[in-house]
Amino acid sequence: MPELPEVEVVRRGLARWTTGRTVEKAEVLHPRAVRRHAAGPADFAGRLAGRTVLPPRRRGKYLWLPLADAPSEAPSEALLAHLGMSGQLLVGEPDREPQKHLRVRIAFTGGPAADPLDLRFVDQRTFGHLMVAELVPDAVAGAAAPAPDGAGLVPAPIVHIAADPLEDAFDGDALYRALRRRRTGIKRALLDQSLISGVGNIYADEALWRARLHWARPTETLTRAEAARVVAAAQDVMRAALAVGGTSFDSLYVDVDGESGYFERSLDAYGRRDEPCRRCGSPIRRDEFMNRSSYSCPVCQPRPRRARY
DNA sequence: ATAGGGTCCTGGCTGC
DNA sequence: TGCAGCCAGGACCCTA
């Protein structure tokens, strides 16, 4: 379940391995993996061939590699990736065995001093996707002039995604005002990528546990201090996860070298049904909500009188 | 416009 | 032991 920390781990790996490489050839092995690329798999592959990838960028759970045609010219397009539930971006030797759920393969030319290498998109459940998208000015970061490395630009399909809590442009006060205008529950709001990006089911539960807020708490009743508390909790827990390589439950989430992270052992709420709360000892409760699970402490996070879903 | 529910997808696990 | 059915969930899509 890659959320912000896991995607950032992948971004860092790609920064090390693919930056400055030129695409020799892209192959789409499963059309669903590029379903959001409206012009189809052949167009997707055609747009990648011959282009050089710049340092990867990220917002929330989205990751993109700006594509350069010429040095010192601002990129106009990017390879945009979302890992979904089970997506992996793996780098390695081009002639290694194909993975079972290999969906897209991108081979790079071996430049000077560059060992042959390819980038593979492997995705069991195919909720993830890749596409080549136009880069447009980033409304979140302000009107900074587009730079040759792609700074100040975002892929057009994700212009509606809000800043994530680990980026400089994140505005906690603006989020508080938006929450007060909403008529929904705090967890649903945390999962709404147009309000705050990068938070998924796991880190939403962890942030709410740390902030001692119930998931069904109406957003319009939040105080400024409570909103600040849950944002700080989300930042803290995601930074802690990032420091140990992210959260892994199984081999489905791995970094570009295929290695798992270690944060699962540090989770306080998610997946801990009936286990004792690490603050008060009460058994952690699991509720059904939005067709998924919510884990919380019944004592530290009491259900509000007026609950919102 | 916003709120909220349905849907996709595969394989590991559960229970009969 | 075999196998049907359940479960995981991000973001798009639809309706009211």
Image (spheres, coloured by chain):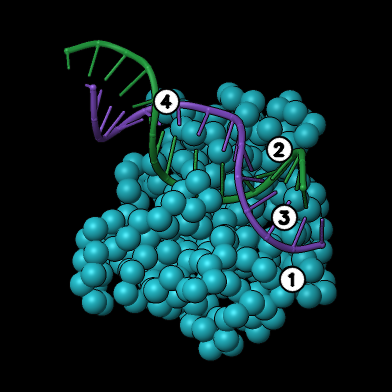
Chain colours: A cyan, B purple, C green
Precedes in sequence: disc 1 or disc 4? 4
Q: Which residue bears the numbered disc 2?
A: A36
C-alpha gap between disc 1 and disc 4:
39 Å
C-alpha gap between disc 1 and disc 3:
11 Å
Circles 1, 4 touching at the beta carbon (< 8 Å): no
Closest to the camera, between mark 4 and mark 2, is 2
C-alpha gap between disc 3 and disc 4:
30 Å
Closest to the camera, between mark 1 and mark 4, is 1
Q: Which residue bears the numbered disc 1?
A: A140
C-alpha gap between disc 2 and disc 1:
23 Å
Precedes in sequence: disc 3 or disc 2? 2
Asked if badges 3 and 4 are on one and the same chain, I answer yes
Q: Which residue bears the numbered disc 4?
A: A100
Q: Which residue bears the numbered disc 3?
A: A158
For label 3, the SS is helix
Circles 2, 1 touching at the beta carbon (< 8 Å): no
C-alpha gap between disc 3 and disc 2:
12 Å
Left/right of residue A120 with respect to residue A158 in the rendered view? left
Chain to which the residue tagged by mark 2 belongs: A
C-alpha gap between disc 4 and disc 2:
22 Å
